[in-house]
Image: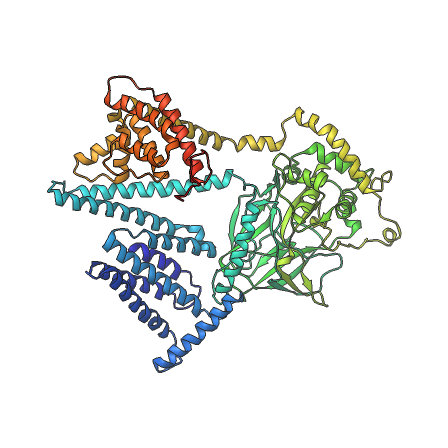
Amino acid sequence: MAILITAASHMGGTGWTEHLEKIPQAALAGGILGLVIGYSRFSRRVATWIAIAYTTFFIPWQLGLLITDATSWNERLTILYARLYWSTQQFLTNRPVTDPLLFVASMLLLFWTISLSAGYLQTRYGRPWLPLLVGGISIVVVDIYHPTLGQKGTALATYIVLSLLLLTLLYYQRNATQWERNATAVDMETEFNLGKWALGLAVAMVFLAWSGANLTASVIEAPEGSEWLRSSWISLRKRMENLFAPLRGPAVISVQVYSSNLSLGTGVSVSEDVVFTAQASQPRPEGAVYYWRAYTYDEYRNGIWRNTFEAEEPFEAGEFLTSPNLYRDRTMIEFSIKVQRHLETLFAPAIPLTIDRPVTALIDQRPLPEVPPLETLAIKVEPLLNPGERYTVQSLVANPTEADLRAAGRDYPDWIRERYLDVPTPYSLSKLAGMIVGDLDNPYDQVMAITRYLRENYVYSATIPTPPRDRDPILWFLFDLKRGFCNYYATAEVLLVRSLGIPARLAVGYAQGEPDPTNTQFTVRQKHSHAWPEVYFPGIGWVEFEPTSAQPQIVRPSGTSLEEALPPPVANPVAPNTRELAEQFNRLEEAEIDRNNTLTPSPPLVAFIQRLWPFLLLALGVLGLVYAVLRLAQTVRTTPERSLPVYLEQQLINRGWHAPGWLRFWANYVRLTPMERLFLQFELISHIFHSMAQPGMTAEERVRALVKHYPWLEAPATRFLSEYEKAIYSPYASDLTTARHTLKDLWREAIRYRFKFKTHPDAPESSHL
């Protein structure tokens, strides 16, 4: 009862809609009814009809109590039927369900049914495992659709511990019945000691499972083909989102969940669903762009971006998230954002200054001797925002001119150089970047040259094939595939810019969206999810650039009339055709990349070595297990009575316990001689051939029964019988090698016969199948 009430309470605690508190009540009532029916003497058929009758009464009764706008029960049931009918039609036709009653009814029926079934199966048969499995799955589903509860994991851990305790209790009761039947004296503290050890082992197993899952997630990359699984899961979640549509609270998180790691991936289809709308306090300044940033990343390794910042601090509503004097010449604009999805990570353009609600922010704390300024890199809120809620954020928006950016220079602070100049394959990328920029020496002109190169020479594609495992995905994108989506465009620009000594980082979130004519109202949809590079300019700060060819180009004012009259600098004037430039670098890269990789270990190799130690520990564990198995096999061959299964069986019997069937089978198998184990294989072969052998037959009689119907098997079967009788009934030594080879011949014939292959002139066409 406690196990299923844990699962029902977990569902009831989501707060997704009203009346979910009835779910634990239904689980309790169903469990009690199941226990009563199980203890009764009704037959299985009668018990089933009683359960159906109570279900038919209980579920409509509970749902009818929720309908307060009708007086008579006839009216309530009519309204109930109509609401459930139309909600079911909406769900089956793949439309969002508008009435939460269907969800409440489904959960009531689910937990009533599994509780009733578990109570009945436990008391009648002692096997409530299928309903308990369904209850555990329900906890997992809730954790998936409710990320706040999912991060805690306490309900699932409690559920597993209680299930293991129940398994121990049922095992004890089964042995206690056997003890009572055999009049076996048992220590009074046996049940207490067994429960104590079971609880300790259950807690230890759950702890190790949780730790192992975290270790695996941290060191193992997604396998090839996982994108198909991911896209299938997204499609299933999209359909189930219709059922969750009328609910409140953190149900389905349709928007991307951002974390400290970001894989470049292979792309997924996106929808037209609105994520949020934003209202600005003034029109967008000339030259400014709005990218609704959620997260930034500073370290790239072999297709994965990481955020290496760890400082998270809570901030009160209205408190400065970023030092207001951190950068010059920025415009403070207030944005009122109305969300249409459940959000955990909040979006804000440029540099967020304040927000009107308590949040937790990931910050970049600058190491200065005076009061250290700080900059917010990501904002999280708990509890999650619900659809229809608003938050107001003040942001410092940059609108520099081209002249401002050219005049910024290269006087980068030390903390910027240390964190935002790392390049994993400096030789390849610096050669390409050098060819792109040519004689340009100003950082802004160099960044713009790289931006134009990526926009003009690479084709946008929403999805791409899985990158090869033996090649960095960005090198594969730049020199082989030459098509991709924003993750690849932005990453390529960040790394190319860094290879020239210019600090840059990757930002993810959403592009500007759809503006209204006044440039103050913006509608941001799921299809606007985006990644872009941000480049650091001294005094100005982080400035966005747009290398993705599917996005509009960023146009900034020149800044002076003289600049407007002059043509922009040309990158690499001796090779103006960037496509020819790419082909030229391909030849150079193929000739020299191998030489460079042999000089010094590349950062990906270093990262691989650093991540290798968990696998070494795993390999040592596997080798230790193999060694233990080999030693066990050697012990079994030499002294079976000292083997593990025989020892365990004997210990249980000595204490008056009933050894489980699998342990008895294992112990009996260990006690067999090698020839007796081979004869077990012969019996299995006879079963495949549908031999007419009966229990109690001797070995010779079994062979004759097989040969009578399958005469072409006489030679190998007779040879095996001869060796078997030598080993069992005579003082002469048998030849195990001959017996094994003979069994191989019989196995070959059995497999061919099973799959309807005629292997002998006298063999029938597998008529027994």
- How many numbered badges does the structure rendering display? 0
Q: Nearer the viewer, residue 289 or 341?
A: 341
- Residue furthest to the top in view is 732
Residue 247 x/y as whole percent:
47, 66
Left/right placement of residue 114 relative to residue 486 reads left
- Residue at x-position 33% and y-position 26%: 718
Q: Nearer the viewer, residue 255 or 93?
A: 93
Residue 103 x/y as whole percent:
43, 66
As displayed, is residue 679 above or below residue 328?
above
Residue 110 x/y as whole percent:
37, 62
Left/right placement of residue 307 relative to residue 542 reads left
- Residue furthest to the bottom in view is 71
Quadrant in the picture for residue 278: bottom right
As displayed, is residue 302 above or below residue 17?
above
Left/right placement of residue 79 relative to residue 654 reads right
Quadrant in the picture for residue 515: bottom right
As displayed, is residue 301 above or below residue 324?
above
Coloring applied to the structure: rainbow
- Residue at x-position 26% and y-position 66%: 50
As displayed, is residue 72 above or below residue 18?
below
For the C terminus, the quadrant is top left
Q: Nearer the viewer, residue 76 or 512?
A: 76
One can see residue 386 in this view: yes
For the N terminus, the quadrant is bottom left
- Residue at x-position 45% and y-position 74%: 83
- Residue at x-position 47% and y-position 69%: 88
One can see residue 502 in this view: no
